Image (tube, helix red, strand yellow):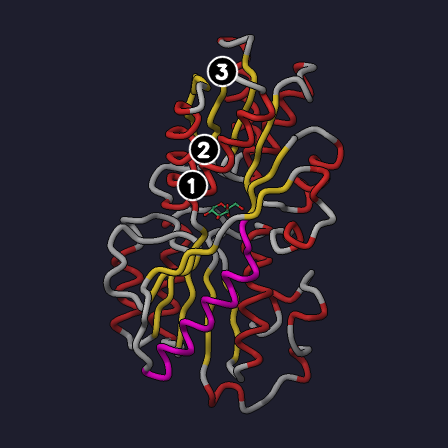
Amino acid sequence: ALGVALAGCSSTAGPDPDTGDPAAEERGSLTFVAGVKGDPFYITMSCGAQAAAEEAGLSFDFQAPNSFSPTDQIPIVDGVAAAAPSALLIAPTDGAAMFAPIQRVVDAGTNVVLVDTALDDSSTVRSSVRTDDYAGGVEAAKLLAELIGGSGEVLLLNFQAGVSTTEARGKGFVDTAEQLGLTVVGQEYGGTDIEKGAQIVDATLQRHPNLAGVFTTTDYGAQGTVASLRNAGELGSVKVVGFDASPVMVEQLRAGDIQGIVSQQARTIGELGVEQALAAMNGEATSESVIEVPTVTIRAEDLESESAKAGLQV
Ligand code: T6T
């Protein structure tokens, strides 16, 4: 429904939906399907997408599954195929399992743009707008190595198998950590379950009492890591680099509970996604099928800088 995603968006997010242009439906309709409900990254992205869609005179609809899974995302996508809006922006929750449902939307005549996550086979959609996640993982490794100050044991607390973004972050991290002389003692998945993330860090600390650092590929992992380190009395001594400057993570950075964030430009991804959708609707040829947006690296002292602002989430 129009306006649902506006909660928490800044005033630059676009017109008040109640005073929206009644002719919008005639110009076209855009649906955004996020990876999971209540996630600050997708909420921030939807603010950018909604503002851009409404500026172009399109109606905007935001939908999100209850869990980050094809089980919950497929019924939503089937609904989109039935409604056949002019355009769909979607973050697939699995690179393989979401191919067929998204193909049904393509076949219904909707212009599909992938945002954030990708499909294993992205050849039938218009384009894919995403973070340069591998490079983000490389940045995270460099920052963690610097914070640790040389060699040491580190944990990769990853998100979920089959998710293109976080897998690329993890790979960029592991490849670089090893080059820099860090020892990756574990690579595990915590998903959106903060408790599970905390248990993984607890168990790693038991096995590796000299653990020097943790890289978490999402803010869910950072929350679990901080809970575990607080409980173990290791906050600040085990260095933590997280991904995504959500409000909770920014607080953790200010408090010194984590020492660095590699963040995505979520709002920009939403805006560029709509730009791609509009070009497709206008029948314009695409010059690039993959558009990669760089990450922003933020330490506590960088929080007020202009560059950090592009990475902050609502
Ligand atoms: O990091 C984001 C997103 O980029 C990733 O694809 C899944 O997890 C998050 O939604 C966590 O906010």
Can residue 251 be found in the magenta stretch?
no
Determine whether 51 is above or below 39 in the image: below
Q: Cβ(mark 1) to ligand 1 < 8 Å? A: yes
Identify the amino acid type marked 3.
Answer: Glu
Residue that label 1 marks = 166
Residue at the image point whose x is 64% and y is 52% from the top: 307
Residue at the image point whose x is 53% and y is 68% from the top: 49
Identify the image quadrant of the C terminus: bottom right
Q: Secondary structure at mark 3?
A: strand
Identify the amino acid type marked 1.
Answer: Thr
Residue that label 2 marks = 158
Q: Which residues are magenta?
A: 264-283
Residue that label 3 marks = 153
Can residue 268 be found in the magenta stretch?
yes
Q: Cβ(mark 3) to ligand 1 < 8 Å? A: no
Contact between labelled residues 2 and 1, with CB atoms less than 8 Å apart: yes
The x, y position of residue 227, in whole percent, is 65, 26
